[in-house]
Image: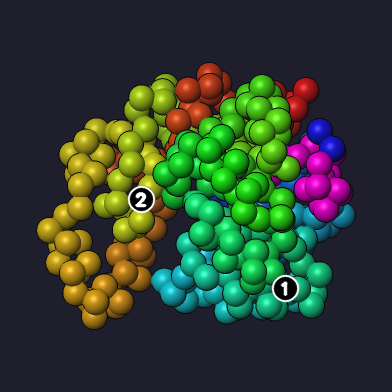
Amino acid sequence: MKTDITDMLGIKYPVIMAPMFLVTNAQMVIEALKADITAAIPALNFRSDSEFRNAISEIKNHSPKPFGVNLIVNKSNYKLKKQLSTCLEMNVGFIITSLGNPEDVISQCKPMGIKVFCDVINSSQAIKVEKLGADAVIAVNSMAGGHTGIIPQKKLVSQLLECVKIPVISAGGISRKDKVEEAINIGAQAVSVGTLFIASNEASVNDNYKNALVEYGAEDIILTRNISGTPLTVINTPYMQKIGNKKSMYSNIINRNSWLKKYFRMIFMLVGIRSLENAANQPTYKTVWVAGPSIEDIHEIKSVKEIVDSLVK
């Protein structure tokens, strides 16, 4: 399993624990590093810069191995400038950019030697970020949990290999060792795995959320725009069945008006973030649980190490 990404990051296995909003915490990253993979943590998981700094310091104190931070790089993230500044100052191993233009992040990270991996869902985006100087692209396919892509893994990885020279990391649908090997065999240099790790002992979400990943299956995953305004895969809980996954009249009016769209997109995302936070951290009837179809292969709650072992050993 030696690849360009394992060489780049100095890890034994070509696996990245994906940065999961409200899920990934410092302890999960530490355990991932102990298990000879790497991991990334979303900057948005922290309410303040001091909490963010403490988490980075905690991880660094436990392991010298490189780990990453996920930055949302669109205009809805008003904390981006400060988050990037902290990443640069504390010299994190790599940055994963999502949902926007990574140009500013890449230009500031390059002089510091910090690698930048960019989420992409098609070849057009991959070509653009390679020209900007990205070190790798994360091919978010149609099986990804959370903010997903629309192209199946094999087709997407093949398309990107034809149009970019930087390494391709496959994200979505990785739930077993044979699927890791399949992704590597079609040309990916690593895989990004998220949903499996939600059902881990170390994940800081409530037990109802974890148990749902055991109880529900792939057929229970739906795509909705009614949470963050961006297509999001979630478990089809009774609450989701109630609110539906079609755009509301409110959303349609905003999307037809460029002025409203500019100023309300941030509000809509913040409201969605709050609903996700409530569902992840406490029992509530508004159960919005993010997950991908790989929940089909989750049958019990395990430790991070046990999950990594199931993927690589």
Determine the image quadrant of residue 6.
top right
Which amino acid does the dot numbered 1 rest on? Answer: Cys
Which amino acid does the dot numbered 2 rest on? Answer: Pro
The color scheme shown is rainbow
Q: Judge whether 181 appears above or below 5 on screen.
A: above
Q: Are marks 1 and 2 in contact (CB under 8 Å)?
A: no
Question: Which residue appears at 86% of the width and 48% of the height?
Answer: 7
Residue 306 position in % (x across, y down): 70, 26
- Crowding at dot 1, Cα within 10 Å, few <14 / some 14-19 / many 20+, comes out as many
In space, the residues marked 1 and 2 are separated at their CA atoms by 29 Å
Residue 263 position in % (x across, y down): 29, 78
In the picture as drawn, the residue positioned furthest to the left comes out as: 249
Residue at image mark 2: 231
Element at label 2: loop
Question: Which residue appears at 49% of the width and 32% of the height?
Answer: 210
Which residues fall within the magenta stretch? 3-17
Residue 302 position in % (x across, y down): 63, 26
Question: Which residue appears at 26% of the width and 73% of the height?
Answer: 261
In the picture as drawn, the residue positioned furthest to the front comes out as: 162
Element at label 1: helix
Q: Is 10 within the magenta?
A: yes
Disc with the residue nearer the chain's start (1 vs 2): 1
Residue at image mark 1: 109
